[in-house]
């Protein structure tokens, strides 16, 4: 079997086993990472590696984690969150409850960051935040809301003290009054459906960098579908939605797109 065909069958079977659509990720990036892991194990072909993963549930779980757990922290790129805050007052005037979607929420730091911002700077605005991710373990961590100190490198000390309970082992748990305004759900950004179709704000940051162009288009089409007219999409510091009009999105300022 030629290498390309074997790789294709490998990604298709991984999708069946884990629901991770590697066939829609950037091929060069995925092949490089997988080949490196294979070399550590002395495995030479994708077929052999697939057999190894199928016969070793622990190894398969570790493989899944490597593709689903991303770097995350509270107030990542704080200057960008300051930009986002400019749009909250106007959006809140048009709805009874500000509905916010953290797409690819990982362990919940982004969703809770937005909740803290709303509690701290926009008192009186009712809101709810939905977080969606494909990784069950990450979602359980998000629901529990306990984090180590390295998650707070960009967070102000007074916010950490105000909105978290500190444990003796340098871990911090999100307060219940923040958690009660969040819902975490399992879902696939590429192949699945958004949790609602009436969001005022969608955050999709540092997620699509792993996807090929076909996958990115599916993600942005789904996000556009989930947004109200006039709702906004907030992307990462190094990201841009090219040909945004195809998705009924319009660039309005740094890292912000509006549904039109």
Image: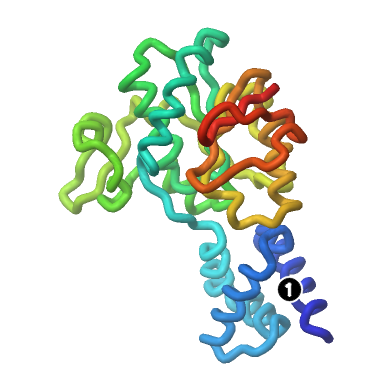
* Residue 110 vertical placement versus 260 (above, below): below
Residue 184 seen: yes
Residue 82 higher or lower than 242, as above or below:
above
Residue 34 placed where, x, y %?
Answer: 60, 75
Q: Position of residue 229 (x, y in %)?
A: 68, 19
Image quadrant for the N terminus? bottom right
Q: Position of residue 48 (x, y in %)?
A: 69, 85
The colouring scheme, among rainbow, by chain, secondary structure or one colour, is: rainbow
Left or right position of 248 against 184 = right
Instruction: Report whether 150 appears left or right of 31.
Output: left
What residue is pinned by disc 1? Answer: 10
Residue at 39 percent across and 29 percent down: it is 82
At 54% from the left and 51% from the top, the residue drawn is: 136
Disc 1 crowd rating (10 Å Cα; few below 14, some 14-19, many 20+) is many
- Is residue 144 shown left or right of residue 132? left
Instruction: Please provide percent x and percent y for residue 71.
Output: 43, 55
């Amino acid at each position: 079997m030629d290498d390309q065909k074997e790789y294709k069958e490998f990604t298709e079977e991984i999708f069946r086993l884990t629901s991770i659509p590697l066939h829609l990720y950037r091929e060069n990036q995925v092949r490089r990472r997988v080949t490196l892991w294979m070399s550590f194990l002395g495995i030479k072909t994708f077929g052999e590696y697939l057999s190894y993963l199928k016969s070793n549930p622990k190894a398969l779980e570790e493989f899944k984690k490597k593709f689903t757990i991303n770097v995350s922290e509270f107030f990542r790129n704080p200057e960008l969150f300051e930009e986002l805050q400019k749009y909250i007052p106007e959006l809140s005037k048009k709805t009874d409850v500000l509905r916010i979607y953290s797409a690819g929420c990982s362990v919940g730091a982004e969703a809770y960051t937005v909740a803290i911002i709303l509690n701290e700077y926009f008192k009186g605005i009712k809101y709810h935040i939905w977080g969606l991710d494909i990784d069950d373990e990450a979602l359980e961590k998000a629901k529990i809301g306990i984090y180590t100190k390295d998650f707070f490198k960009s967070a102000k000390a007074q916010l950490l003290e105000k909105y978290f309970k500190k444990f003796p082992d340098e871990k911090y748990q999100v307060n219940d009054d923040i958690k009660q305004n969040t819902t975490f759900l399992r879902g696939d950004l590429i192949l699945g459906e958004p949790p609602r179709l009436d969001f005022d704000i969608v955050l999709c940051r540092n997620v699509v960098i792993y996807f090929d162009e076909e996958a990115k288009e599916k993600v942005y089409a789904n996000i556009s579908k989930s947004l109200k007219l006039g709702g906004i999409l907030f992307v990462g510091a190094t990201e841009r939605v090219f040909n945004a009009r195809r998705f009924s999105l319009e660039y309005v300022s740094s890292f912000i797109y509006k549904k039109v």
